[in-house]
Amino acid sequence: MKNPFKIIACDLGPNIFWEDVLLSIKLLFNPKKNGIEIKNLEEKFSQKFGTEAISFNSGRTSLMAILKSLGLQNDDEIAIQAYTCVAVPDAILWSGYKPIFIDIDESNFNLDPRDLEKKITKNTKAVIIQHTFGIPAPIKEIVKIANKYKLFIIEDCAHATGVKHDNEYLGKFSDAAFFSFGRDKMMSSVYGGMVITQNKILAERIKQYQEKLEFPSKKWIIEQLFYNPLIFVIVQTYGFFNFGKIIHLLSKKLKLLSKAVIELEKKGGKPEYFPKKMPASLARLALSQFERLDIFNVKRLNFNKYYQEELRDLPIANPAFNYPLLRFTIKTNERDKIKIFAQKFGIYLDTWYDQPVAPKGTDFNAVGYKINSCKVAEEVAKESLNLPVNPNLSKKDIEKVVAVLNKYYAKS
């Protein structure tokens, strides 16, 4: 039965189902740090990708583990694309290295190989290939350049867990790759991450790094386990006399909802819960989602195809890629007007990434980004609008999003 009070949103528990809520509540009664669940998750990942798999408490920690295991020198440069989250340059800075920002190709939101080659210096030691929104980056071109300049290749698969390109999983085109199980990623344990690599020596170094880490505090684990039940109630009751909206505002004010990025990180600072091991309770949540990942991705792919077909006559630029996307991102100079219009119908669209290093409030100086250094990324960030492809939405929900967009342009 359809819930008339539920809102449609990209970022409020996009993967949460009843079973995730019930599992989170069950785990709250016994929040575990260590346990067999961690090894089980690593083994499942290892089997799926045919690689070594090492877990951590976040994508940030996973990237740090890779960087710290490459044998680099302090202040060596790591090339990353602009049009990204502050979590990526932060992890580089926390590891003792320097992020170098590369512009993007606006047709696919990913790193532009031509700008990469222009900005490589004698101090550049690695390149991170981000698969933005689940759209594969131009891997062959980037790998060719990386090999020419002897750069380590790291794939950022935070948006692309389980996505295949050229009949191979993203994450297997590099020396190592990392994944995020954040609250709004392809699969979610609220916080969590994984490294995969086919390099046995590198894998051993990363395992040694993992072994030296501590688990996050039990208080932090409980905060993450509380997220699913609370956000589920918020989403389901948002339109019931603003009940869910009020709970959402109160939860933020009382700091009951954990945040994906805190203010300290926007200034390059490192919270005390990074880097840490993956706790068993969150590994159990991740296992449950991992078992449904292929089902999630089929739904995402079908929603992607539907958007492409139904929006092709509207005056917007939308991605013509047949992959299970994390978010279906269009470009329009009427972004903010569309967002406001859609909210009247209970649809909350999002703006990843609304600046070259997101989210808003990020201190560009602190993370080493210079204005006008990546002009395409800066322009695309002004026009990006995310449409939901959440696996917990129905076809009717996606049809409603399309109908509202058509209604907006019909009145324009």
Image: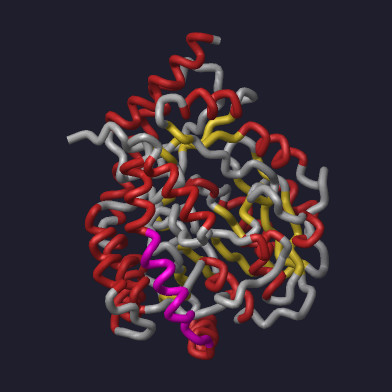
Residue occupying the point 76% across, 68% down: 98
Q: Position of residue 247 (x, y in %)?
A: 42, 49
Please name the colour scheme applied to the rendered image.
Answer: secondary structure
Q: Which image quadrant is residue 100 in? A: bottom right
Residue occupying the point 67% across, 52% down: 81
- What range of the chain is rendered magenta? 213-227
Q: Nearer the viewer, residue 239 or 182?
A: 239
Quarter the N terminus occupies? top left
Location of residue 103 with respect to 169 vertically, above or below: above
Location of residue 76 with respect to 243 vertically, above or below: below
Q: Which image quadrant is residue 302 in? A: top left
Q: Is residue 175 left or right of residue 127?
A: left
Residue occupying the point 61% across, 23% down: 334
Residue occupying the point 53% across, 59% down: 260
Q: Is residue 110 left or right of residue 256?
A: right
The answer, for residue 125, to whether it is visible in the render is yes
Q: Position of residue 365 (x, y in %)?
A: 81, 58
Asked if the magenta segment contains residue 222, the reply would be yes
Q: Position of residue 256 (x, y in %)?
A: 46, 61
Quarter the C terminus occupies? top right
